[in-house]
């Protein structure tokens, strides 16, 4: 089986590379965004013609949530046009697409976990373009999995955990938002879940939610990061109003993972248990 991974230099792409050797029946092709440009259909068609993948995991995305507000055309190009191109090329080559999306497709007005059937209502450019990308895939390609995830972190790339550790070493005190609720997701756990979907041999296509288990605010997440890494700091909870950002974020974006657990028998760790010390 041949699997093409786009966006291989990002968090999820690097996490997939780290565990690829555990799946010896799969022949992986890892392509960075410089090597495979999903915004170019011609580029994709050329690569697919050579590699002939059975699956494509799209880990390429525009993820700068705040920056997207001032450059929506860039977010649209990658998250919408890129997704559309992938869906069309996958259809031409009989390739199953696994596309990673986000909890930011929701507005955060619920106070119970979001299911895959809940109405979407993105509040910013990033979430809007990710939802539009989902829609392009849904209308073009039947064999697809859209995996929505949240608060992704890992030892790779830039993310909240690494930012907190850096700031924790530089400062004596830090203020973190305590009124946005969601669930941190270890990119290594997400990577393993995606490969388990492929290895299952099932064809239960559609949208799925995946994050670690549990609930946290960004303040809770920061507190646990410092605890696990033995960093002593004066951590202060603040409100979203006290820390305004260009993009509006969902107040609540916890996701219900029942569907993916039942469909593929995937065990999901509590977010606190998955958080490891970072060197």
Image (cartoon, grey):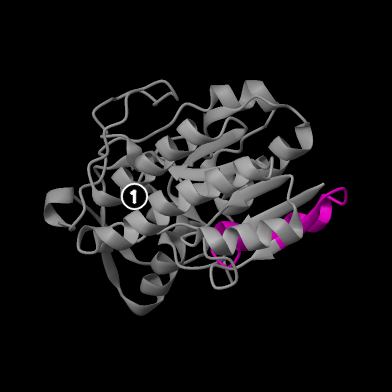
SS state under label 1: helix
* Residue 127 screen position, x and y as percent: 32, 45
* Residue 183 screen position, x and y as percent: 43, 41
Give the vertical position of 213 relative to 249 (above or below).
Answer: above
What is the residue that sits farthest to the bottom in this orientation?
170
Give the vertical position of 126 relative to 148 (above or below).
Answer: below
Give the vertical position of 179 relative to 171 (above or below).
Answer: above
Q: Which residue shows up at 41% across the image and 76% down it?
A: 169
Q: Which residue shows up at 31% across the image and 56% down it?
A: 65
Q: Is residue 125 left or right of residue 275?
A: left
Q: Tell me which corner region of the image, top left, top right, bottom left or bottom right, holds residue 199.
A: top right
Q: Was residue 27 drawn as part of the magenta stretch in this picture?
A: yes
* Mark 1: few/some/many CA within 10 Å (<14, 14-19, 20+): many
What is the residue that sits farthest to the left in this orientation?
241
Front residue (pair 61, 248): 61
Judging by the rendered image, the residue that carries numbered circle 1 is 218
Q: Which residue shows up at 32% across the image and 24% down it?
A: 119
Q: Is residue 272 visible?
A: no
The residue range painted magenta reads 7-29
Q: Is residue 165 left or right of residue 72?
A: right
């Amino acid at each position: 089986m041949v699997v093409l991974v786009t966006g291989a230099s990002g968090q999820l792409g690097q996490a997939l590379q780290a565990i690829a050797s555990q799946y010896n029946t799969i022949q992986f092709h890892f392509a960075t965004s410089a090597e495979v440009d999903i915004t170019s259909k011609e580029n994709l068609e050329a690569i697919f013609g050579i590699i002939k993948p059975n699956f494509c995991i799209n880990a390429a995305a525009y993820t700068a949530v705040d920056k997207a507000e001032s450059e929506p055309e860039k977010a649209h190009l990658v998250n919408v046009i890129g997704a559309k191109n992938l869906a069309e090329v996958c259809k031409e080559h009989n390739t199953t697409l696994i596309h990673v999306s986000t909890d930011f497709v929701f507005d955060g007005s619920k106070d119970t976990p979001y299911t895959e059937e809940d109405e979407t209502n993105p509040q910013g450019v990033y979430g809007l373009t990710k939802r539009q990308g989902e829609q392009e895939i849904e209308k073009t390609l039947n064999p697809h999995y859209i995996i929505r995830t949240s608060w992704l972190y890992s030892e790779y790339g830039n993310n909240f955990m690494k930012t907190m550790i850096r700031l924790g070493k530089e400062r004596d005190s830090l203020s973190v938002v305590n009124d946005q609720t969601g669930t941190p997701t270890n990119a290594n756990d997400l990577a393993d879940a995606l490969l388990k979907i492929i290895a299952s041999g099932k064809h239960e296509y559609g949208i799925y939610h995946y994050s670690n288990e549990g609930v946290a605010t960004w303040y809770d997440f920061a507190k646990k990061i410092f605890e696990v890494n033995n960093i002593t700091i004066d951590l202060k909870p603040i409100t979203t109003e006290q820390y305004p950002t260009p993009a509006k974020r969902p107040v609540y974006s916890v996701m219900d993972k029942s569907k993916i657990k039942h469909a593929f028998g995937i065990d999901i760790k509590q977010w606190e248990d998955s958080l490891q010390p970072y060197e």
